[in-house]
Amino acid sequence: MGRKLLLEHINVPGINTFDVYRQQGGYRAVEKALKTLSPEAIVEEVKKSGLRGRGGAGFPTGMKWSFLAKPEGKARYLVCNADESEPGTFKDRYLMTYIPHLLIEGMIVSSFALGAAVSYIYVRGEMMPQIRILERAIAEAKNAGFLGKNILGSGYDLELYVQPGGGAYICGEETALIESLEGKRGNPRIKPPFPAISGLYGCPTVVNNVESIAAVVPIINDGGEEYAKVGIGRSTGTKLISAGGNLAKPGVYEIELGLPVEEFIYSEEYCGGIANGKRLKAVVAGGSSVPVLPANLILKTVNGEKRLMSYESLADGGFVSGSMMGSGGFIAFDEDQCMVRNTWNFSRFYHHESCGQCSPCREGTGWMEKVLHRIEYGHGKYSDIDLLVDVSRKIEGNTICPLGDAAAWPVASAIRHFRDEFEWHITHPAEAVKRNFGLAHYADPLPPVAEPA
Amino acid sequence: MSDKVKVTIDGITVEVEPGISILNAARQIGGDVVPPAMCYYSKLEGSGGKCRTCLVKVSKGSEKDPRPMPKLVASCRTNVMDGMEVQNITSPEVVEARKGVVEILLINHPLDCPICDQAGECHLQDLAFEHGSEATRYEFERRTFDRIDIGDKIQLHMTRCILCYRCVYTADQITNNRVHGVLGRGDASEISTYIEKAIDNDFSGNVIDVCPVGALTDRTFRFKNRVWFTKPVDAHRDCPTCSGKVTLWYKGADVLRVTARKDQFGEAEEFICNTCRFDTKQTGDWVIEGPRNISNNSVISANHYETLRPLPVVQNNALLQEANKEQFERATKF
Ligand SMILES: Cc1cc2nc3c(=O)[nH]c(=O)nc-3n(C[C@H](O)[C@H](O)[C@H](O)COP(=O)(O)O)c2cc1C
Ligand code: SF4
Ligand code: SF4
Ligand code: FES
């Protein structure tokens, strides 16, 4: 069994309530932090832990915290990003629903470390039940003296607020989130300045994902070094994976980073293989924004090594033959799934969610969606495939925020790896609307890489 | 001069104030090295960064940190550093990306220039002429909107809008009531007024001048004439509300239109009030100063014979003259 740092007590009945959470050792991290540690010491522990942001970009959390500007006389804010809307990702919602006090505890410790007197949890608007759960949990914690004035007699004051969003994917981008939190239209800001210098209301701000903040709890309880012992290389600790698609046992799993992908998919401890005895065709490893990989590249890298669930191993091969950890939204596709249809579906999402500020993303996402729709419905042309690649290149890297890249990568990677399936849609339009291309050669073992002479 | 910083753009070095944008540094050089700017407007705080036509490549970050920037950057929103080296038209990557942006700006544009009042002074038209290709690869229906009258003086033709946000910043910053903003998201976004309320204040007409395309036009000039058949004349009057410095656009003896005076980058020198713009169209209302010089590249100048007067920084620098040679030659052809 892999170690569980976040979900250790998830099966204890009533763990969503303050009392049970407390009985299981909850809020120890707050006591330890406020009574025995200085804010700098907490930042130091988080640095030592090697924790990397769980929201998608994988930026080291300790480093991010140490960049926070600390000008005299200005408030500082911690904002928790609970906007979780990446297709295929549902781990934050799970955590907030079943063990909300873990997030509250993490928020208190992190806010103390950053010197924030007011912190926010920005929750995606559709998650109304979770908003109620969090508000209840905050009230319970406040009742027990863990929030409000002079927490545990330490002299530290903290108010924690839950802010529902309007349900826009773009409000998960940290600067758009800040704009939205300020009551404005959720358009990403043009950087610099970065939020660490000028964020919420022009004050230094840290935005962190729900899971990143929750992970601070075990880091403080056991120490950064202990945390760093779990995992592999620069991918330390555990990660929540939202496993979805055609898996026998989809759900949220806490894994130790470094677990082989094959074991994650096929072992009984985790996903239990592909549903209905089908064969695996493709995987999107980190939420819809990351490149899709065919079965033969997700289980092994081009060098024939086992691919592991870690930031480095998933990215091995770069854009040519690798993908990314992203937010941990693991979507498996079986042999009956159509990659063209899926790519179109993802494109539809990005088209719908683009904020429309910058031209390449606003216009390009719609263009790609329309071309993909045409191919999927049997009206495509050969030139459409190259057109898609070209439009995706025109978007990638040329936009204000990474949503442009996130829209471009799934299209570019699907065409890179599944080009024959796209071509088949064009050469066999009548057949393509009636049946799927099937597994084809996408699970065949890769030929060994020739040694360079 | 010690507090100035050195930047090199397309091989031409200038000394500029620290903290200005690459675009403004390029504007001090002038000529072809100036990236086109569809959304940035020097008089509007927070503008820029949106259209992405001004993308450039920073091949050397600064003297201190010479690493190149990993992506192309929007020159209007990226500040210069001492020793920075920038490539605009000398970088094939930039030229390619800009072409892409222009193509993308045009896919949903109605291309109704023949019936658009902006034609002749439209920045999108100029941009498309310089960077576009004759044919589009976009084979789908274009997005359309109904025309909306914003009060009796301004018309919004959203179909032509490129969502540069200039009018939004104008309404926000130079008028005292914010009634104008963006609704919707992505390519369904539209410029709108608060429940179609007329933008009703003294400076609202300036949204017409800042609009780079024909999305916001002057209803008092609608279909009156093509701008290149009218003659621009600088004039002023004693105005209690604004500076009163304007350009009058004559056809024969009639003033068809009044606009702010626009500089060589198409920006209003000073914003003017609605009385000057819409209600004072008699020559007698004005003190005439003389003909307005319009950039020789513009179709409006087609019948004005003048040679290009280069910027001072170009005049006394042989290297710059060489770099702008093509520009001079093109200009003197007229
Ligand atoms: C379009 C877009 C959507 C995003 N959505 C989310 C999200 O829903 N949740 C999240 O935690 N981060 C999201 N991010 C990443 C955030 O911008 C930011 O990097 C993250 O919240 C930082 O937290 P971390 O360092 O703890 O990962 C999104 C980024 C982009 C560009
Ligand atoms: S890339 Fe897309 S979502 Fe991001 S700012 Fe530009 S238009 Fe908005
Ligand atoms: S109406 Fe004109 S100024 Fe306003 S956003 Fe559209 S193009 Fe820009
Ligand atoms: S002018 Fe720089 S992005 Fe529009």
Image (tube, coloured by chain):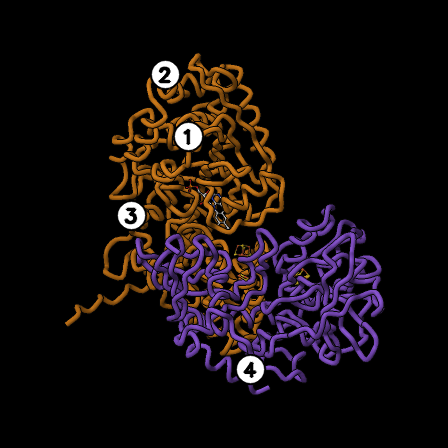
Chain colours: A orange, B purple
Could you tell me how far apart the alpha carbons at marks 4 and 2 are, in whole angstroms?
A: 75 Å
Local packing at callout 4 (Cα closer than 10 Å; few below 14, some 14-19, many 20+) is some
Q: Which residue is mark 2?
A: A35
Asked if marks 2 and 3 touch (Cβ < 8 Å), the reply is no
Q: Amino acid at mark 4?
A: Ala
**Could one spot residue A93 in this view of the protein?**
yes
Residue on which disc 3 sits: A260
Chain ID at mark 4: B
Check if mark 3's residue and mark 4's residue have beta carbons within 8 Å. Answer: no
**For the residues tagged 4 and 2, is the chain the same?**
no
- A201 versus A366 height, above or below: above
The residue shown at (65%, 66%) is B262
Q: Secondary structure at mark 2?
A: helix
Residue at the farthest left position? A453
Q: Position of residue B63 (x, y in %)?
A: 31, 57
| Lateral position of residue A31 relative to residue A50, left or right | right
- What subunit carries mark 3? A
Query: Gap in Å between the C-alphas at discs 2 and 3?
Result: 40 Å
Residue found 45% across the figure and 67% down from its top? A393
* Residue at which label 4 appears: B331
Residue B44 in the image, given as x and y percentages of width and height: 61, 54
Residue A298, by quadrant, is bottom left
Name the quarter where the N terminus of chain A is drawn. top left
The three-letter code of the residue at mark 1 reads Leu
How far apart, in angstroms, are the residues tagged by discs 4 and 1? 59 Å
Instruction: Pick the residue in front: A392 or A10.
Output: A392
Q: Residue at x 65, y 72 (%)?
A: B122
